[in-house]
Image: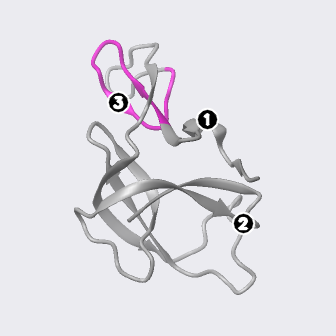
């Protein structure tokens, strides 16, 4: 069974959900969770599980291979779509898995596992 590449990004693995945090002073939600609010600098944001569905806010195509731990397939790097998904209180930067079609701003997408490299690890993605 594969393991998360960055376990701190997940609130739960079954069912899958991303970890965020909510500031006790200003209620700002952030992803990934942090010990200090990015908006007002208050200490102690509380951990929360983020929604598992949202809408594509914007997107583009990644046309060069990322740094390690990304591993290009043996057949060579293939460009792929990335974007921001609006989860209501926070935007999450993510890999988009929409098959052969192009993503569209406003499309509803759902959280899913995305294999990394040989499949020993996974990260998150959003797809239709």
Crowdedness near tag 1: few (<14), some (14–19) or many (≥20) residues, C-alpha within 10 Å = few
Magenta stretch: give its range. Answer: 19-35
Q: Decide whether residue 24 is among the magenta residues.
A: yes
- Is residue 12 positioned above or below 107 on the image? above
Question: In the structure shown, which secondary structural element does the residue marked by tag 2 occupy?
Answer: loop
34 lies left or right of 116: left
Q: Are marks 2 and 3 in contact (CB under 8 Å)?
A: no
Q: Quadrant of the C terminus?
A: bottom left
The percent coordinates of residue 72 (x first, y second) are 69, 74
Crowdedness near tag 2: few (<14), some (14–19) or many (≥20) residues, C-alpha within 10 Å = some
Q: Nearer the viewer, residue 99 or 5?
A: 99
Question: In the structure shown, which secondary structural element does the residue marked by tag 3 occupy?
Answer: strand
Residue beneath disc 2? 117
Residue beneath disc 1? 8
Write the residue at 72% across / 66% down: 117
Write the residue at 72% across / 55% down: 121
């Amino acid at each position: 069974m594969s393991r998360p590449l960055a376990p701190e990004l997940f609130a739960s693995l079954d069912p899958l959900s991303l970890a965020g945090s909510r500031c006790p002073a200003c209620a700002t939600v952030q992803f990934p969770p942090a010990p200090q609010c990015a908006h007002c600098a208050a200490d102690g944001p509380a951990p929360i599980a983020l929604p598992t569905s949202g809408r594509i806010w914007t997107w583009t195509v990644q046309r060069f291979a990322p740094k390690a731990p990304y591993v290009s397939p043996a057949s060579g790097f293939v460009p792929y779509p990335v974007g921001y998904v609006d989860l209501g209180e926070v935007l999450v930067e993510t890999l988009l898995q929409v098959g052969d079609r192009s993503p569209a701003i406003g499309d509803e997408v759902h959280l899913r596992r995305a294999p990394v490299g040989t499949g020993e690890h996974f990260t998150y993605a959003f797809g239709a």
